[in-house]
Image (cartoon, grey):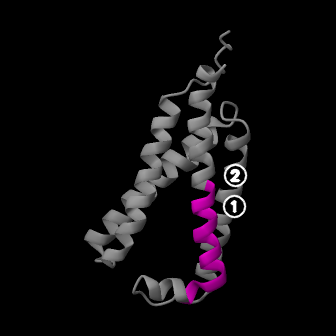
Amino acid sequence: MIEAARPSSFVRSIAAASGIYDAAVGFFLLLGADHFAALFGVAPARPPIFADLNALFLLAVAAGYYWPYRDPHGARWYLWVMGVALKGAGSLTFILDYFVRHSPKSFLLFAASDGAFAVLTLAALAGSRSTPEPLRR
């Protein structure tokens, strides 16, 4: 029984960590966008609605991780879309923005964190099956 649970527990761990990460960034943006911007050495978003909308987006994405946490096999699609595709594309976007538009070096922290989550999510999904394994006795 423990052997069959291992891949699911890794997927659940990634879903929980991703949800917490997105919620934390979303709450920081929603409750203190100006301070968050100052922390990264950039001007606050103007008009502030841009930061608010990004915060709401992150909070919605974070809430969505509840389903793969509860059902690692049935909600794999969410991890593929939000964990691998979105976080991978986000990481690439931060890197390209750094080189093309010369965004602050501090933004590479988001590239690293999003990239790490994308790779870990891919590893979790690749290491588990889309259908539950039969329990071993």
Assess whether mark 1 and mark 2 are in contact (beta carbons under 8 angstroms).
Answer: yes
Q: Residue at x 54, y 27 (%)?
A: 128
Identify the image quadrant of the C terminus: top right
User: Depth check: 46 or 125 in front?
Assistant: 125
Q: Secondary structure at mark 2?
A: helix
Tell me if residue 33 is in the magenta stretch. yes
Label number found at residue 60 = 1
Position of residue 54 relative to residue 81, above or below, is below
Position of residue 25 relative to residue 90, above or below, is below
Label 2, label 1: how far apart the Cα atoms are: 6 Å
Dividing the picture into quarters, in which one does residue 41 lie?
Answer: bottom left
Q: What amino acid type is highlighted by mark number 1?
A: Ala
Dividing the picture into quarters, in which one does residue 112 lie?
Answer: bottom left
User: Depth check: 100 or 40 in front?
Assistant: 40
Residue 42 position in % (x across, y down):
42, 87
Q: Secondary structure at mark 1?
A: helix
Identify the image quadrant of the N terminus: top right
Q: Residue at x 33, y 79 (%)?
A: 104
Q: Residues within 10 Å of mark 2 (few under 14, many from 20)?
A: some
Residue of label 2: 64
Residue 27 position in % (x across, y down):
65, 74
- The majority secondary structure of the magenta stretch comes to helix
Q: Which residues, given as a range, are shown in magenta?
A: 19-34
Q: What amino acid type is highlighted by mark number 2?
A: Gly
